[in-house]
Image (cartoon, grey):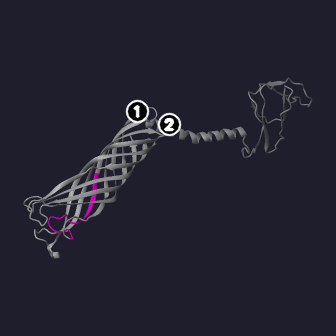
Amino acid sequence: MTYFTEWPEILSTAAGTRRRAILARKSGDNPLIMVRVSTPVGEVLERLNRPVSKTGVGVTPPWVRIPPSPFDTDVEFSTFDTARRRRATRPFSTRIARYRRGRVGVVLPAVLWILTGTALAQESGFYAGVPAAAERLRVFYEKAVDNTDPRNMSPSEGRVYRADDTAAGAAGGVGFLAGYRVPLGPNGVYLSGEGDVIFPGGAARGRFEGAGASPGRTQLGESWPEDWSFRQNRTYGFTVRFGAGIPAGSGLSAYALAGLRRLEATLEADYVGCFRPESCMAAEEFVSGTFRYEEGFTGWTTGAGLEQRLGRGAVRGELRYTDYGSAGRVVPYDDLAITVPIGMKPDGIGFQLSLIWHF
């Protein structure tokens, strides 16, 4: 228990312990010296009343007993400027209390943030976001020129010329996604289904050398050389993710994914060749041109990633491998009795970064 006084008096203990402190003040002095006295458990403080007679003759008064203090602490001296009312020093216990309150002010919000992210991670519901993807695209392109039709009148009558080429390039783009997430247990295990669409840019470009009997492989019935490109127009699909918290309750989760993927792309090629049944010799006898075909591919994708929950938001990064499948067509030249089947098989390895909001 702590006692303060402003009168000249003596505080002593009743249990035979030593005198603890003397508080004194001279009339009109500044600053005022004050002493805080805390006594050990079991001590009893006694205060001797001052003389009360005008003659100055002391009168023996009764002793005034003050209840014992509950615990022991130190003695703190404090200086008060009576003009400015400012305390120069603070008790050690006060500084400790303020330090602890400061730590609580820092730690408590962090704990609440983690617990909030953990609780939200266990919620089921819809989410949506914006993905940004970058991919190394690889395309296998093959072509055959079939002259086996009996009506064929080319110099390569009865023959089939085949050639192929592989090219790679960088592609990337942005889009949007939406999905639904279902928790499977108390440890952050979850399952989600998600659909997304991305509008990429970039292309794979290559040089198709062609095949044939002539030196330049540019006569009718041969597979002519081409400068070709394969450009992604749009890709979309549906994936399933199975994930779990690492460590459980931290808001960070790892997951594996698998799903179906659809790709819409454009194949474009520039060529130079001869369309005459007899061989072309002069440069002006050759024809140059460009063909363009829109193709659709359906394949599968798989990968893995990490997701960090930030309240109701999340940041997600994942690596993917996508096999877009294959597609092709047969280009007929009925007037020449020639058919040209072509085929393409794209795939890609990429990284996707997504910003997500959970509703």
Of residue 266 and residue 250, the one placed in the foreground of this image is 266
Q: Is residue 172 above or below residue 184?
A: below
Distance in Å between CA atoms under marks 2 and 1: 18 Å
Estimate the x, y position of residue 311 in percent, counting from the top left.
45, 41
Would you call the spot at circle 2 few (<14 residues within 10 Å), some (14-19), or many (20 or more)?
some
Estimate the x, y position of residue 31 in percent, counting from the top left.
79, 45
- Comparing labels 2 and 1, the label whose residue is closer to the camera: 1
Which range is magenta? 215-234
Q: Mark 2 points at which residue?
A: 115
Q: What residue type is labelled 2?
A: Leu
Q: Kindly identify the residue that appears in the image at 39 percent across and 43 percent down.
A: 357
Q: What residue type is labelled 1?
A: Leu
Q: Kindly identify the residue that appears in the image at 17 percent across and 65 percent down.
A: 222
Q: Can residue 100 be seen in this view?
A: yes
Q: Check residue 12 for magenta coloring.
A: no
Q: Is residue 359 visible?
A: no
Of residue 216 and residue 352, the one placed in the foreground of this image is 216
Q: Which mark is residue 240?
A: none
For mark 2, give the secondary structure. helix
Farthest-out residue, left: 151
Q: Is residue 325 above or below residue 67?
A: below
Of residue 76 and residue 161, the one placed in the foreground of this image is 161
Picture quarter containing residue 28? top right
Q: In which quarter of the image is the C terminus?
A: top left
Please give left or right for residue 63 compared with residue 1 in the image.
right
Asked whether the residues under the numbered discs 2 and 1 touch, taking CB atoms below 8 Å apart as contact, a structural biologist would say no
Please give left or right for residue 11 compared with residue 260 in the image.
right
Q: In which quarter of the image is the N terminus?
A: top right
Would you call the spot at circle 1 few (<14 residues within 10 Å), some (14-19), or many (20 or more)?
some
Q: Kindly identify the residue that appears in the image at 68 percent across and 39 percent down.
A: 96
Q: Mark 1 points at which residue?
A: 184
Estimate the x, y position of residue 105 in percent, counting from the top left.
58, 41
